[in-house]
Image: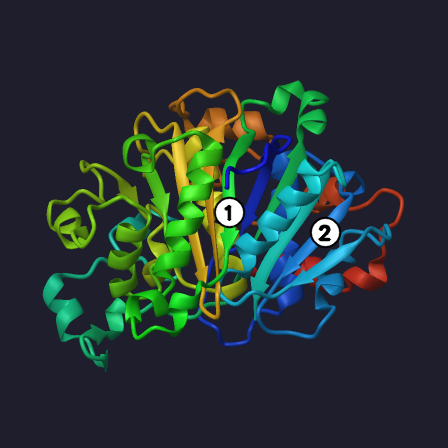
Amino acid sequence: MAPKPKAPSYVLGVGMTKFIKPRGKVDYTELGFEAGVKAMLDAQINYDDVEQGVACYCYGDSTCGQRVFYQFGMTQIPIYNVNNNCSTGSTGLAMARQFVSSGAADCVLVIARVNHEHSTRNPYSQFQDVYTLDQILDAPMIHAPLTKLQCCPTSDGAAAAVVVSQAFLDARPHLKSQAVLIAGQCMATDAPSLFSRSAIDLMGFEMTQHAVRVAAAEAGIDVARDVQVVELHDCFSANELIVLDALGLAKPGKAHELVRAGDITYGGRYIVNPSGGLISKGHPLGATGIAQCAELVWHLRGWANNRAVKGTRAALQHNLGLGGAVVVTVYKRADGAEAPVADDKDVGRANGLGYNPAVEARGFTKEEVKKVRSRTASSDWALQDTQAKVEARF
């Protein structure tokens, strides 16, 4: 079935915390607040502009999303709490797109959280070490043949995105150069093959194939030919091979040849997981999908200049939750051009932050928080000491 035409939806702002070991030292309200402030600063909006909120998490009480959003303001907007296993973040992104494309909202804030060579270039990665092949193979065995360094760590962290309509963007023409179009997207669930004896289908192979076909058709691209940058769900090294195949980036059964030829890294055919992927960047379950989105948005803006991919016009995201749900998204620049080359100083001047968030993780000032909190319905009771805690970490 051909995808139904949708009104354009754009990612206008993104923000992230650093991903850290899950030791319970940073509360979810603090993580969500930091990511949300950064996303709204990036989009150059105030919380009063937000018409709907989507809170994404895998663990927590049924309405704890409100606890995060109320810190920005108690404006009585709808707030939806989403849990879809490891695809929770991108499920929230898909919901936001549906709200915008249907005309239900012009501005939606999505906040997602949880209480190896490429990753060295990503300031938000949990691990930034480079390992040799021998170190990977000699690491403790988790389940043969996967060693510890072939399995993603669970993490604490948060990410946020602001999704807006064409009308919202048209009213802010100075922001069009940073807006990224959600050109195609499909969320899919399991087929009956889940109950076959195929381990590959148990890992989401068939639903990934379906989702990428629909998303690519909507975006009007050929994945193998047109995509330059990919963020995929590499929770284990074996999964990466299966997903490369399912997405159509490799010939059936030949993903290992793509890897051996160096065609998933710099100098190769595609750049896969420039963020470091789940194995190095970390996997805070609910936040992973929005973190992938942020990485690809930075690439298409030309901001990820310490890990940029020259000539990027289309970026592909794959986020999987077993049980099961998968979301595949195709992103393009709003102007249809390829990603420019942007200097850090130019980025800092353009975004008003004074630095490039794609290559440097910073906190924020009291003045910046004041810019994004509601002017009409903010509550210090809801905020409590969250802002002070974030400032103390930086």
Residue name at image x 71 percent, y 28 percent: 168
- Colouring scheme, one of rainbow, by chain, secondary structure, one colour: rainbow
Q: Which residue corresponds to mark 2?
A: 53
Crowdedness of circle 2 by 10 Å Cα count: few (<14), some, many (20+)? many
Give the residue type that dot 1 points to: Cys
Q: Is residue 307 left or right of residue 385?
A: left
314 vs 207, nearest the viewer: 207
Residue name at image x 49 percent, y 60 percent: 189
Q: Choose top left, top right, bottom left or bottom right for residue 236.
A: bottom left
Quarter occupied by the C terminus:
bottom right
Secondary structure beneath dot 1 equals strand
Residue name at image x 59 percent, y 73 percent: 59
Q: Which residue corresponds to mark 1?
A: 186
Q: Is residue 345 left or right of residue 270?
A: right
Q: Is residue 111 above or below residue 201?
A: above
Where is residue 100? Give x, y as percent: 69, 39
Secondary structure beneath dot 2 equals strand
Disc nearest the viewer among 1 and 2:
1
Q: CA separation, marks 1 and 2?
A: 21 Å
Q: Is residue 232 left or right of residue 72?
A: left
Q: Which mark is residue 358?
A: none
Give the mark nearer the N terminus: 1 vs 2.
2
Where is residue 105? Give x, y as percent: 75, 40
The residue at the far right in this view is 376
Crowdedness of circle 1 by 10 Å Cα count: few (<14), some, many (20+)? many
Q: Is residue 111 left or right of residue 306?
A: right
Q: Choose top left, top right, bottom left or bottom right for residue 270.
A: top left
Q: Is residue 125 above or below residue 305?
A: below
